[in-house]
Amino acid sequence: MVVNNNSNALKLVGTIFAGVGLILVVVGGGIGNHQYTILKSWPTVEATVTRSHVRRYLSQRGRMMYQAEIDFQYTVDGKAFDTLAGPGYSTSSYAGMKSIVDEFAPRTRHLVRYNPADPNDVRMNAGYSFGFFLLPLMLGGMGVFFAALGIIMRIASRSAQPLLCPACGCTVERGERFCSNCATPLAA
């Protein structure tokens, strides 16, 4: 029996959506696991802000973007570190980045988490907050949506597949053993 090309296309698109969805879920889960590892295994240290400012730059699309840059000074195991950090994202809102820079003004002290394998690697915003887990939540949510949509498309492709006689191309009903138009035997 031959199936309609439209149902094959729907099956293909559904498979692609489901695959992309699963990839997004895996990537989001990996990033979420890394964030969780930071919270569970990276120690905290009190750091002093030595400098903070808003850096502006043009994006690839020519849009003005802003990023907070904060210099932290701290000591780990008797060794002094001076590390540049930021919130981990840029925005087109100057006011949004300015508020972060104001919160991390020079000479203020903050707890930061540092990577024990590389104390220069710090996170200034690590915590059990929506913002810290936003990226893995977004990727995971989009992944679940795409995977579900792909599965629905694949299911719909099965019910939408008209069966065609291989000899004459006429539509035949499921379960028929012979084509009603040309009497060609149909495979089960």
Image (spheres, rainbow, N blue to C red):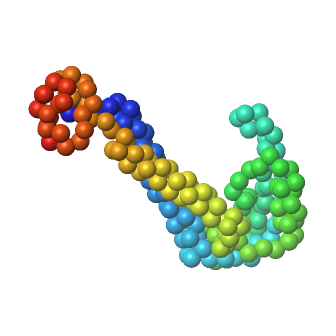
The x, y position of residue 109, in whole percent, is 82, 74
Q: In this view, does 111 lie above or below 25?
A: below
> Does residue 34 lie above or below 89 as drawn?
below
Q: Which residue is drawn at 79% across and 60% down?
A: 70
Residue 1, quarter of picture:
top left
Q: Residue at x 78, y 37 (%)?
A: 63
As drawn, the residue found furthest toward the left would be 185
Residue at screen point 69% across, 57% down: 88
Question: Which quadrant: the C terminus?
Answer: top left
Of residues 21 and 148, the one nearer the viewer is: 148
Q: Quadrant of residue 60?
A: top right
Residue depicted at 58% across the width and 66% down the height: 35
Q: In this view, does 10 lie to the left or right of 146?
A: left
Residue 25 in view of the camera? yes
- Quadrant of residue 166 within the rendered picture: top left
Q: Is residue 76 above or below residue 157?
A: below
Looking at this view, is 121 or 20 the one in front?
20
